[in-house]
Amino acid sequence: MTATTTSLTRQIVIFDTTLRDGEQSPGASMNMAEKMEIAQALVELGVDVIEAGFPIASQGDFEAVREVARNVRGAVICGLARSRDADIDRAWEALQYAERPRIHVFLATSAIHREHKLRMDKEDIIRHAVAGVKRAKGYCENIEFSPEDASRTEIDFLCQVVEAAIDAGVTTVNIPDTVGYATPKHFNLVIQTLRNRVPNIDKAVISVHCHNDLGLAVANSLAAVEAGAGQVECTINGIGERAGNCSLEEIVMALRTRHDFYNAGTKIATRRLVPISRLVANVTGIQVQRNKAIVGQNAFAHEAGIHQDGFLKERTTYEIMHPEDVGFSRTDLVLGKHSGRAALADRAKTLGYNLSGEQLDTVFAAFKELADKKKEIYDGDIASLVEQQIHAIEEQWRLDSYKVVCGTGQVPEVVLRLKRGDQKFTTTVASGDGPIDAVFLAIEQLTGMAVECRDFMVHSVTLGKDAQGEVMVQVEHAGQIYRGRGVSTDSVEASAKAFLNAVNRILAVAGRKKAEAAK
């Protein structure tokens, strides 16, 4: 694996909050198994700190933090808490099982928050902050404190709060740009001022947590590093509330590529950036745009003639990073219908997936089926096959066959057959706005599952007229959002599979709740 630090650079702590702040993206909620999978992938990536959740927010959040603390080794496990006794106690209840626990206490400090949200004066803020830190310190040594909305807090008062928190025992002081208000020059000055004016600042690591409301989260984080910050809080793919957070892959590769300027690096295994980006995208249903820096499909594409000519003569003319260094393959076309299990396993491993024997059997069978439909199998196809297996759930309902008749000005008619166990169920529906809508209505009729489709996305997994289409759906059932995913060279079939995947997830959750109630 390629790490981004050398003996000549200072090491920046990478604090990943995908499981906490990232999950606050609308529609991005994750179940327990998904959180555990991402947490383990973050350890393999090399992150230093995993913020696993906000334990007092819900019973589900508490259980997720507790399970990550119990089972994940190799990183500091952190839980968020307001500067309240109940929050801090609940955080420790979940974190006590961690190999290296950290409690992250926060309290808003800006004038607008003091007046309108907290209704506290400055003295109250300092008193509550100190009390919260001391209570957390009674549980573990590793304590982080965040003055929420720090970038809009009066600088004199911010210095006072930070000094008081460090005196109370904080080991990391985080300076959040909570609403993405800062600019690089402004944020750099804030960090410099804290370093120059807080007398005990050397007793704590300065961290930053930047939001992307103005598109400046990465730029502000880099400005903070330049000013002396030692920790950056970020998420995979930059997901998070509103416009999101500082993108982990972008901050890591910026430090790596411009180490000459920042003289700073991380211990991230950068070749795992693309695999974990794909993992988070598939788990959350939030797909990465094609032109996304570092991990987007077009990040290393060269189409303009001048660019292609220069690249072919010397790759550094238009390429400041190697695609291999972040987990892309230089040779995308890899396998065909005559390729064997060993070749598939090797390619999957190159793409960042370690398959068990049983998983490889299933993926290989799907690979052979796909190879009969496509002459050429690309890395994107293989990644899609693997992810379908890794994230598979019990299929109570499966697509057996469908037939659609439709045309301009014609009401679509679908004949759909589903399997449940050994039984087959068939229905005919003549309704809907088009073939996909008709298929959805037919699935609802056969499964007896009434849902509201909230989002529908389709994109091509790879290039070419025989490319697979990947469909992502979000549906609402009983007030809860569920995601479904389907892949096929037939976009209508992929849509049916995605909708059934969501139905099966609803049934799986209902089954778990029923089993828990029976205990």
Image (cartoon, grey):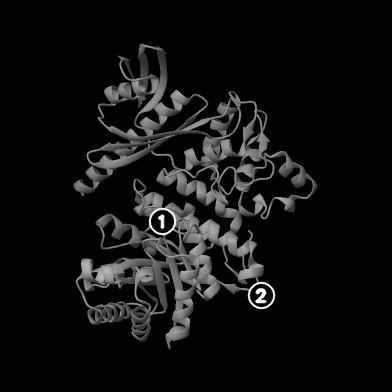
Residue at image position (60%, 23%) is: 372
Q: Quadrant of residue 416?
A: top left
User: Sequence-wise, which precedes: disc 2 or disc 1?
Assistant: 2
Q: Quadrant of residue 306?
A: top right
Is 22 situated above or below 488? below
Residue 236, disc: none
Q: Residues under labels 2 and 1: Cα distance?
A: 34 Å
Which kind of residue does numbered mark 1 sit on? Asp
346 vs 40, left or right, is right
Q: Nearer the viewer, mark 2 or mark 1?
A: 1
Which residue is denoted by mark 2 in the rendering?
8
156 vs 76, left or right, is left
Which residue is denoted by mark 1 in the rendering?
213
Is 393 situated above or below 44? above
Where's residue 478, x and y in %?
22, 39
Q: SS at mark 2?
A: loop
Where's residue 241, x and y in %?
36, 54
Q: Residues within 10 Å of mark 2 (few under 14, many from 20)?
A: few
Q: Considering the image in quadrants, where does the N terminus appear? A: bottom right
Residue at image position (27%, 77%) is: 132
Is 243 situated above or below 184? above
Q: Work out whether residue 242 or residue 166 is closer to the camera in this orientation and state it.
A: 242
Judge whether residue 179 can be spotted in this image.
yes
